[in-house]
Image: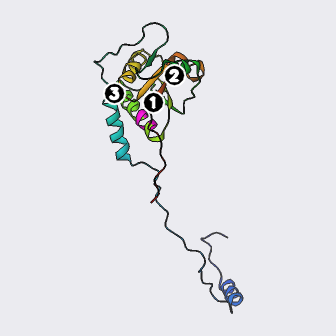
Amino acid sequence: MSKNEKLSAEEKALFRGLMSGTRQLSQDTIVHKPPRKKFNQVPVKRLLSEQMDASHYFSDEFQPLLASEGAVRYVRSDVSHYELKKLRRGDFTPEIFLDLHGLTQKQAKQELGALIAACRREHIFCASVMHGHGKHILKQQTPLWLAQHPWVMAFHQAPKLFGGDAALLVLIEVEEWLPPELP
């Protein structure tokens, strides 16, 4: 029976006859609560400010001294070279991936800043940045930008499994997680 069909007078009388002597149930066991706001979502305004704050480290004019021979690599002076070796061997598995294909340099800087901020916020230690081959603009600029950021501990050309020479594995310094204090 569709909603548009009307009941005949005979059907209505039959229904009323069957329902005579019944009483309406009171619903007292289920209380519908309004849906709660999720607290683990970060407000959009905060995300945008983190993205802009983290991307201001990247300059096109500053040229850090990177190894010119072999694979693209960098290790901060206070970090062990063994970490770089582990990156090269593929001992670290990236937990987050950033694809820069098709982005302008400005967009790529902002996305790199957002990636680093997200890694620190989510306590992610290793990330993969896929810059691709293309015209080699992002391939050349991405390592220069990453070497300037104070939270980047090291990066190395990714193993074949994670993109080979079209990607970088990046180690990011994260704050040590402490459980919240109980009152």
Q: Circles 1 and 2: CB distance less than 8 Å?
A: no
Where is the C terminus found, in terms of image quarters?
A: bottom left
Q: Earlier in the sequence, mark 3 or mark 1?
A: 3
Q: Circles 3 and 1: CB distance less than 8 Å?
A: no
Residue picked out by circle 1 = 172
Q: Earlier in the sequence, mark 1 or mark 2?
A: 2
**What amino acid type should be assigned to the residue bearing mark 2?**
Glu
**What amino acid type should be assigned to the residue bearing mark 3?**
Lys
Q: Nearer the viewer, residue 4 or 127?
A: 127
The span picked out in magenta is 115-119
Query: Label 1, label 2: how many angstroms apart (C-alpha)?
Result: 12 Å
Residue 106 numbered tag: 3
Residue 83 numbered tag: 2
Secondary element under disc 3, as helix, strand or loop, is helix
- Number of numbered discs visible in the structure rendering: 3
**Where is residue 65 drawn, in percent x and y?**
36, 13
Q: Earlier in the sequence, mark 2 or mark 3?
A: 2
Q: Which of 124 and 39 is in front in this view?
A: 124
For discs 1 and 2, the disc positioned in front in the rendered view: 2
Does residue 177 appear anywhere in the picture? yes
Secondary element under disc 1, as helix, strand or loop, is strand
